[in-house]
Image (cartoon, coloured by chain):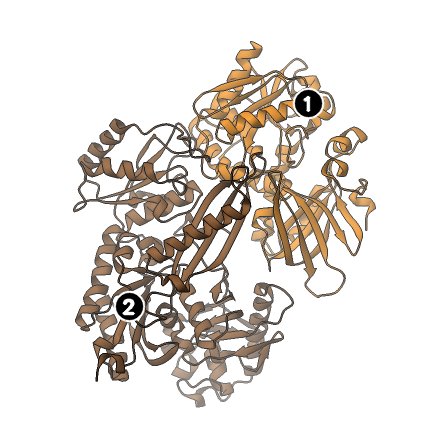
Chain colours: A brown, B orange
Amino acid sequence: MSRTDQPRLRLGIDVGGTNTDAVLMHGDEVVAWHKATTGRHITDAIVAAAGAVLQQGGVTAEQIFAVMLGTTQFTNAVTERRRLNPVAVLRLAAPATTAVPPMSDWPEALAAVVGRHHYLLKGGLEFDGRPISPLDEAEIAAAAKDISRLGLKAVAITSVFSPLDAAMEHRAEAILRRELPAETCTITLSHRIGRIGLLERENAAILNAALSGLAGDVLGAFTQAIDDLGLTAPLYISQNDGTLMTAAHAARYPVLTFASGPTNSMRGAAVLSGLDDALVVDIGGTTTDIGLLLEGFPREAAMTVDVGGVRTNFRMPDLLALGLGGGSLVRDGGGRIGPDSVGFELQQRALVFGGDSLTLSDMAVAAGNMTLGDRARVAHLDCVETALAQAAAMIETGLERVRPSAAHLPVILVGGGAPLLRGESIGGGRIVRPGHGQVANAIGASIAMVGGECDRIFSLDEISREDAVAAAKQAASAQATDAGADAASIRIVEMDEIPLSYMPGNATRLRVKAVGDLAGTSTGISTGTSR
Amino acid sequence: MIKISLDDLDDIALGATFLGTGGGGDPYIATLMTRRAITEHGPVTMLSLDELADDALVFSCGNLGAPTVAIEKIMGADQPPDAVLALERYLGRRADALLAFEAGGSNSMMPIYIGAMLNRPIVDADGMGRAFPELQMVTFSVYGAPSAPLALASEHGDTTILDIDDDARAEYIARGIAIRMGARSAMAAYPMDGSTARRVAIAGTTSLCQAIGADLRQSRGQNRDPFAALIKMLAGTHYGHAKVLYAGKVTDLVRETRQGYAIGQVTIVAGDGKGPPLTIQFQNEFLAARQGGALRAIVPDLICILDSEMAQPITTERLRYGQRVTVMAVSAPPIMRTDKALAVFGPAAFGLAEPFVPVENLD
């Protein structure tokens, strides 16, 4: 067959702590899927899961034009404080910001792993772009010598208002490089990964630098797996906001993968159901996550998000987590469910598997809406109706809290525990049960888009609001194109305007997010291997 | 006289967010600053207004600038003390104690921070009893204590003295200087003696912040209604009358920029869908709550929106669709409700048509 006769397929992979899922996608259609255990070797898990779907689909490596992978490896490393390397922290801001030195609010255990190597140096900008103080190049050179002497292999540089103008971060990097060559030391510039909000952006830069050693290994394992599978397609990694980055970018900015799992799950629900505006209920083994899809993307949390006890301002989906899942323990004759769960021990402890724990999965099996283990073991239970009604009531209350208005949005049900909820509707919303909901994460990864963002302060005395908005939209779109988006598909999905209260001058902060299809996804022409 | 130590800061910050009535800025960064200052320099002594000597010199402290800049350009460690030291140099006299000009929001922390850095006592009082958008909206101005002379300081150690006998002009010029200082100035103002402070300041507001914060925090750990507990606690203070106005979900939010303020309106619909929705008008802070054409609460009485589950006070910039919230109204203390006070920060000062009606007289 000639190349043009074959369907062009995408491979979506989700590497979780427990399972590694793979899906083979043709457009929005699932060709094949497989779940494997992650185990100790990521490469093996990916090869097992992806190899299985390639075989099931009967496709050749050449037919795969892109591989999209989502992972929780880096989030887990921070929360478990393992495999993090020490970091030198450069902040360009003095004499401003000295009242709160770097890592002031970090959990002691995590700070101890990363170390407290801080250099609070001259530099930084005012909100209007003037320097707070000029860079002192000799001071930076001295810091470089010190970092080299300490043998630190990762540096995080944060300059005040660098999201407005990053020149000082770039200049400082260039000076450090004289002492700290790229082969032995990674340097993270804060403007690459964060928005306005100095401490949160600096924290993200430090975490990123701390993950740099692990990032090389993990991305190496991913790449190895792709090679072992004989795939030549480019590898993309999904970010927390549901957009993609190249594997090379992820190796440098592992922190951008934080919380990509829930985002992928919600995006997967959107594509599986064909709905852009809906509530998503993801029922897992221990928890149920409820979120809201707006125009196909999860609504973002407004609050800052803690990762491993560190405050960051990443774009994260706004999720309500309920202690309700397939492994949740059932008590009081079905009147009380969870929040504790047998978790991954379901296959040992649930009644249907001969265990002694009464779980919600046992109820679903007894009621006949889930096939698992031995149904005869739960035939005698008389609390089934009460328990399932209680579970539905808990989910209904959760939906009520997440639902934006009285509008009765459809409810998309995904996750392995989806059969726990029966019926056609809940709380006035129609229930949609898409096929392949159990691998929504990997599907979400496979359909991720490419995004760009602009976060800048404009003086509306100097520029009209219309011009400011247009400039911000253009900057966000240009960033998306640079990241590999097909220019024709780019659209603005979010715009926030925050007035600089209390000050004359009519300054306002505009934050605009643009997304587009990965070049090649929509047209089927180029594979978009930018950067 | 009591001591403020590390363990007190989170409660004070939580209570200050409540008294911020939607504005005043997130005290998070100011709390980190103060935690470090107390760790290095020790606890801060807090005096009641009654404990001040008649001739004691008292300064009012806080920051002038934009909250949006505050989250990026954090202050220099010496910046707030520098404003106090500059005013002392100008007056040729050391300040005996410091108080906040604004108990609501991030400014609540500033006297404690400077008190730790310079080893000065603070006074358990302030000039707003909540948060307000303009510097001259303080009881000090209302009752004839002038803002002048006042000192502003930048992170560079640059200081300016403004000796302007009209508080509105002083505010205007001070803001111009604050912009040139990068929209983040530390300020020491309203120098007054102890007997004046007793006459013009709102008593007990720092300890009230702490009490409110402690009350909300303790409710979280226990199986009790946080709102009922808070109402009971406030009944024993000069903010005597507190009530729950409404509980429901945010269904509409209109927010825009006008003259540098976040101006808008939030609509809340009751969970059971019964009865008319509650609308709250805001200009940085919540100004008026109305329901079905009837007024429920109006400035300077406090309107506070809290997360229904965690009882966490919510600021205007953190309001969003779908939030489950409980709205409380709290009577402002008598010193904030006189005709003179209402002329400065009553409904008319915010362009509202309704006259002030005490929340306890409204349904």
Mark 2 neighbour class, 10 Å CA radius: few under 14, some 14 to 19, many 20 or more: few
The foreground one among A58 and B300 is A58
Dot label at residue A526: 2
Q: Residues within 10 Å of mark 1 (few under 14, many from 20)?
A: some
Residue in front for this viewpoint, A447 or A257: A447
Q: Residue at x 18, y 36 (%)?
A: A178
Residue B246, how many percent across, how many down?
A: 71, 55
Which residue matches tag 1?
B50
Q: Quadrant of the N terminus of chain B?
A: top right
Q: Residue at x 17, y 71 (%)?
A: A228
Do the residues bearing badges 1 and 2 touch, measured as CB atoms within 8 Å? no
- Which kind of residue does numbered mark 1 sit on? Asp
Secondary structure at numbered mark 2: loop
**Could you say which is closer to the camera, residue B91 or residue B155?**
B155
| Residue situated furthest top in the rendering | B92
Which corner quadrant of the image does residue B248 belong to?
Answer: bottom right
Among the 4 quarters of the image, the one containing residue B203: top right
**Residue B306 place in picture, x, y as percent:** 63, 51
- Residue A220, can we see it? yes
Between the residue at mark 1 and the residue at mark 2, the CA separation in whole angstroms equals 78 Å
Q: Are marks 1 and 2 on the same chain?
A: no
Callout 1: chain: B
